[in-house]
Image (cartoon, rainbow, N blue to C red):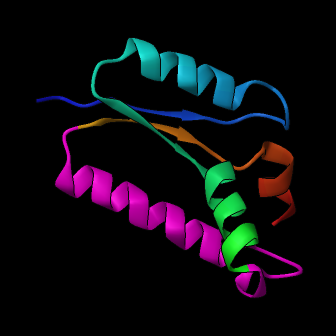
Amino acid sequence: MNRVAVMTVGKTHSGKTTFAKALERQLVNAIVVDQDNHAEILQSYYPALVPKDGANAIKYALTQTIVDHAVDQTDCHLILCATPIETAKAV
């Protein structure tokens, strides 16, 4: 089966997650992998692991692990919600 991967990138509050969720509802067997969710999990449950400055390597590692699992262990289409552009440029 051919799969689709879509990555949404844009400024904060530009509608990346809204678009991704709408696409997920339309695309059969799709999942949204949203870095905002990963950041929230880390802030809520592992705040001591979140760096105060610089790149959030643990968030990126968590996202990579989830994406790798989805690619290797499922046949899901992937819709990726990335870090906002201004954050990515700052790192």
Residue in view at x 62 percent, y 77 percent? 58
Which residue is most to the top?
A: 26
45 horizontally vs 89: left or right = left
37 horizontally vs 6: left or right = right
Look at the picture and state if 56 lies above or below 17.
below
Looking at the rendered image, the quarter that the N terminus falls into is: top left
Residue in view at x 77 percent, y 55 percent? 88
Looking at the rendered image, the quarter that the C terminus falls into is: bottom right
Residue in view at x 39 percent, y 55 percent? 67
Look at the picture and state if 60 lies above or below 74.
below
The question of residue 79 being in magenta is answered with no
Q: Main secondary structure of the magenta part?
A: helix
Look at the picture and state if 43 lies above or below 67.
below
Q: Nearer the viewer, residue 33 or 85?
A: 33
Which residue is most to the left?
A: 1
Q: Can you give x and y, in whole percent of width and height, for residue 33 in the image?
A: 50, 45
Snapshot quadrant of residue 16: top right
Magenta span of residues: 47-75
Residue in view at x 20 percent, y 47 percent? 74
Q: Can you give x and y, in whole percent of width and height, for residue 37 in the image?
A: 63, 52
Look at the picture and state if 14 lies above or below 44.
above
Q: Can you give x and y, in whole percent of width and height, for residue 24 in the image?
A: 45, 23
